[in-house]
């Protein structure tokens, strides 16, 4: 036991701490505030405290626990809401009411609730780390697969089906004469990546239901992406849309320094929304980490790693998992504040010199892998992080460090937000390095995916080149073929790229429907080219009745869409410009 020697905001220096270890969890002060050792010098320990330090006094006791910060993993994670250090906010509300109190201890997982365990191995079987020994039906969408903890192996002496709490023994192993009980719960260090057999290049599309993402700038399962944008560009809505509709088995939403009202809106809306693939409530496949802006700043740093550890755990079961983090800029700001209080040598704009390596430690834990253990299975963890550059300046350190790591950029544009074009993903600045690897997936939908996508991007690029001329001389001075490019690009922007997150139909678009919508626009563009070559004016084409019918594509309910498109294509083949 040591005692407080110095206090500087959330940073506490304790003396008489010989024998402590870096990243050891400690109890600080008479109220036993939770903290973590981040530095040691002689008998002094530098501690970052995960709770408000107002009222702490020099000389109060500091007690080490002898353990590093661990994440509890087991049944009860899905549908739960945690703070930045994995304290269950649901349990805290039941125990102490609606307001947080310093020094409160809550378990991440319910110790009293019983789960029905069904074994998949039998007595006498030899099992090793990562082997699945049984399952628990956690929700209607998630079967929780109970795995042998990493570093454990042996022969099954006892295993039985029944109702168990997460701390009761469900199986007994024997290895080299020693017996080890297995429970439904295991623990893992938050900052240590979990093991896997082999890593693969991501090549299957992560279906998000957002057309510009799925079609023009696809993100693969197991990939990593960044969404930078200035204030008001819709970063939070983009991430919420991905967490709501992405066709993964499990989604994890980390609100890192988010505004409290936005986080409350997320939690409220997810209780009502249904998964489009199954029709069940979305909260049956979601985990929330709510570390809002008014919570202690240092908890932001660890909240990201707790989220990715959970993602790796479910990945190891063979699931496709999506983790969205909003926002990594506020996480970096927390590191900058701690670095300043520790008097570390600052890097660019005051951020710590290890900013890039810390970001890499987070993003590089994504991936599509072969999991360890039997039966053989593959899983993926996809990571999407938003970045909030001050003044929408993408040259600032956090954005630049992130872009050196990720493979997909969704650049949000303030100018598009001012035009009320949402999502505000700029098609000229965004990119995806997975476009070539996911084309095989798209080719199963339609073999002309690459052709349609390339034509659309070229048309949008051509429009951008013509905009300067239009500003100088006006659109009427352009030749007819250039006027047609502007018309086609406007249709792509307004009828395909623009998508309402709040429209009951337009909020989510299936891949087949996405392809058909853009194919329809590009087909009309091709027919219009032929018409202009025959002498028809673009003004006549733009007044055609077929254009409003194309603009209504995104509002047609799914059950009526196929018939609507068959009739639309039939009319285009006959005489579209009447």
Image (cartoon, grey):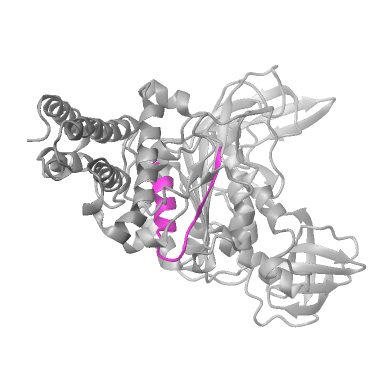
- In the rendered image, the quadrant that contains the C terminus is top left
Residue 558 appears at what percent x and percent y? 22, 34
Task: Tell me, yes or no, whether the highlighted magenta stretch contains residue 280.
Answer: no
Residue positioned 79% across, 66% down in the render: 63
- Picture quadrant where residue 182 is located: top right
Q: Nearer the viewer, residue 154 or 19?
A: 19
User: Can residue 263 be seen by looking at this rendering?
Assistant: yes
Residue positioned 34% across, 33% down in the render: 277
Residue furthest to the left in view is 578
Magenta segment: 223-245
Residue 393 appears at what percent x and percent y? 53, 64
Q: Nearer the viewer, residue 22 or 533?
A: 533
Horizontal arrangement in the rendering, residue 347 relative to residue 85 (left or right): right
User: Can residue 420 be seen by looking at this rendering?
Assistant: no
Q: Nearer the viewer, residue 185 or 49?
A: 49
Image vertical order of residue 302 relative to residue 451, above or below: below
- In the rendered image, the quadrant that contains the N terminus is bottom right
Residue 336 appears at what percent x and percent y? 67, 68
Residue positioned 52% across, 62% down in the render: 388
Task: Tell me, yes or no, whether the highlighted magenta stretch contains residue 244.
Answer: yes
Residue furthest to the right in view is 42
Q: Nearer the viewer, residue 326 or 37?
A: 326
């Amino acid at each position: 036991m040591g005692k407080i020697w110095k206090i500087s905001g959330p940073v506490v220096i304790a003396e008489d701490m010989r024998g402590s270890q870096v990243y050891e969890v400690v109890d600080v002060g008479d109220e036993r505030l939770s903290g973590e050792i981040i530095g040691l010098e002689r008998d002094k320990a530098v501690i970052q405290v995960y709770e408000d330090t107002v009222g702490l006094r020099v000389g109060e006791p500091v007690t080490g626990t002898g353990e590093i910060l661990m994440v509890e993993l087991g049944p009860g994670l899905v549908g739960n809401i945690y703070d930045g250090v994995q304290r269950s906010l649901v349990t805290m509300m039941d125990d102490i009411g609606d307001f947080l109190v310093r020094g409160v201890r809550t378990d991440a997982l319910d110790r009293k609730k019983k789960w029905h365990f069904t074994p998949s191995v039998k007595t006498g079987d030899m099992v090793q780390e990562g082997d699945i020994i049984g399952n628990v039906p956690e929700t209607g969408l998630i079967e929780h697969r109970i795995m042998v903890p990493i570093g454990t192996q042996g022969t099954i002496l006892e295993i039985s089906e029944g109702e168990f709490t997460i701390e009761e023994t469900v199986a007994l192993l024997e290895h080299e004469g020693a017996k080890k009980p297995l429970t439904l719960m295991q623990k893992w260090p938050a900052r240590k990546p979990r093991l896997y057999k082999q890593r693969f290049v991501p090549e299957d599309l992560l279906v998000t239901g957002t057309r510009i993402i799925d079609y023009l700038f696809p993100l693969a399962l197991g990939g990593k992406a960044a969404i930078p944008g200035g204030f008001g560009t819709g970063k939070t809505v983009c991430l919420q849309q991905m967490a709501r509709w992405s066709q993964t088995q499990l989604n994890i939403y980390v609100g890192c320094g988010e505004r409290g009202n936005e986080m409350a809106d997320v939690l409220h809306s997810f209780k009502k929304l249904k998964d489009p693939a199954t029709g069940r409530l979305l909260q049956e496949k979601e985990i929330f980490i709510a570390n809002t802006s008014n919570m202690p700043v240092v908890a932001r740093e660890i909240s990201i790693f707790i989220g990715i550890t959970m993602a790796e755990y479910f990945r190891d079961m063979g699931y496709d998992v999506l983790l969205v983090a909003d926002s990594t800029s506020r996480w970096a700001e927390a590191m900058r504040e701690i670095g300043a209080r520790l008097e570390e040598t600052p890097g660019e704009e005051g951020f710590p010199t290890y900013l890039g390596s810390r970001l890499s430690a987070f993003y590089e834990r994504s991936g599509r892998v072969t999991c360890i253990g039997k039966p053989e299975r593959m899983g993926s963890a996809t990571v999407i992080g938003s970045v909030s550059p001050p003044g929408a300046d993408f040259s600032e350190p956090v954005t630049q460090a992130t872009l050196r790591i990720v493979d997909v950029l969704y650049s949000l544009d303030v100018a598009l937000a001012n035009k009320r074009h949402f999502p505000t993903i700029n098609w000229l600045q965004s990119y995806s390095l997975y476009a070539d690897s996911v084309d095989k997936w798209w080719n199963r939908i339609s073999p002309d995916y690459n052709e349609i996508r390339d034509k659309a991007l070229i048309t949008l690029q051509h429009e951008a080149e013509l905009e300067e001329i239009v500003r100088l001389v006006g659109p009427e001075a352009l030749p007819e073929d250039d006027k047609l490019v502007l018309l086609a690009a406007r249709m792509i922007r307004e009828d395909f790229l623009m998508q309402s997150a709040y429209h009951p139909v337009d909020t989510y678009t299936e891949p087949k429907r996405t392809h058909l919508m853009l194919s329809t626009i590009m087909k009309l563009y091709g027919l219009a080219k032929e018409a202009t070559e025959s002498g028809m004016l673009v003004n006549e084409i733009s007044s055609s009745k077929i254009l409003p019918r194309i603009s209504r594509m995104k509002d047609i309910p799914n059950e009526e869409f196929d018939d609507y498109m068959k009739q639309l294509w039939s009319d285009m083949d006959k005489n579209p410009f009447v």
